[in-house]
Amino acid sequence: MSKPDYVYVTYIETTADKLWHALTSSDFTERFWFGYRISSDWKVGSLFSLTKDGRRAVQGEVLITDPPNKLAYSWDVVKEGVEREQVSRVTFDIEPHGGVVKLTVTHDNLGPKTLRDISGGWPMVIASLKSFLETGRELPADLLTSGAREAYHA
């Protein structure tokens, strides 16, 4: 039996290039990803990491980089206090549709705890990304201190 997949689809009023830049720039991710900074040189085989306050929460390897269409990396939660499961995979498919862009986030090879955690996390992150690109304002950081916090670990 294969591991469950998590798929989230949204449409964002932006360009594929701007969306790609937002997903791969630490200055942008720090704003919309509730203080987490992403870093990598975005070459296949390179390492990537998500850090907050100087502490690594997630690390992985860049698996696919096809700017501005597709990005994929492995996802290994290394945050202190979080039980580790097998390494999973995140894929971002970016498809222009007229004046908007369709973003499909697929997270697969998930363990049960990771599936539960990302099911609360990705909707907040992607909603904040959408707001940031469309209005210049990310969602409020206190969203993570509300009831949603328990479901979000990255």
Image (cartoon, grey):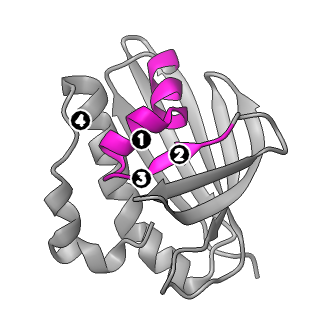
**Label 3 Cα neighbours within 10 Å, binned few <14 / some 14-19 / many ≥20:** many
Quarter of the view holding residue 69: top right
Residue flagged by tag 2: what amino acid is it?
Ile
Q: Which residue is mark 2?
A: 38
Residue at coordinates 70% horizontally, 34% vertically from top-left?
A: 41
Query: What label sits on residue 29 in the rendered view?
Result: 1
Crowding at label 2, few (<14), some or many (≥20) Cα neighbours within 10 Å? many
Where residue 2 sits in the image (x, y, percent)?
74, 76
Give the side of residue 124 with respect to residue 91, left or right: left
Q: Write down the region rendered in magenta.
A: 17-40
Q: Which is more N-terminal, label 4 or label 3? A: 3
Q: Nearer the viewer, residue 141 or 106?
A: 141
Q: Is residue 116 left or right of residue 134?
A: right
What amino acid is at disc 4? Ser
Badges 1 and 3: C-beta atoms under 8 Å apart? yes
Residue 47, x across and y down, in percent: 74, 49
| Circle 3 residue | 36
Secondary structure under the numbered disc 1 in the rendered image: helix
Amino acid type indicated by mark 1: Thr
Q: Give me the residue at 67% from left, 49% from top.
A: 48
Circle nearer the N terminus (1, 3): 1
Q: Position of residue 49 (x, y in %)?
A: 61, 53
Report how far apart the C-alphas of labels 3 and 4 lie in the structure.
17 Å
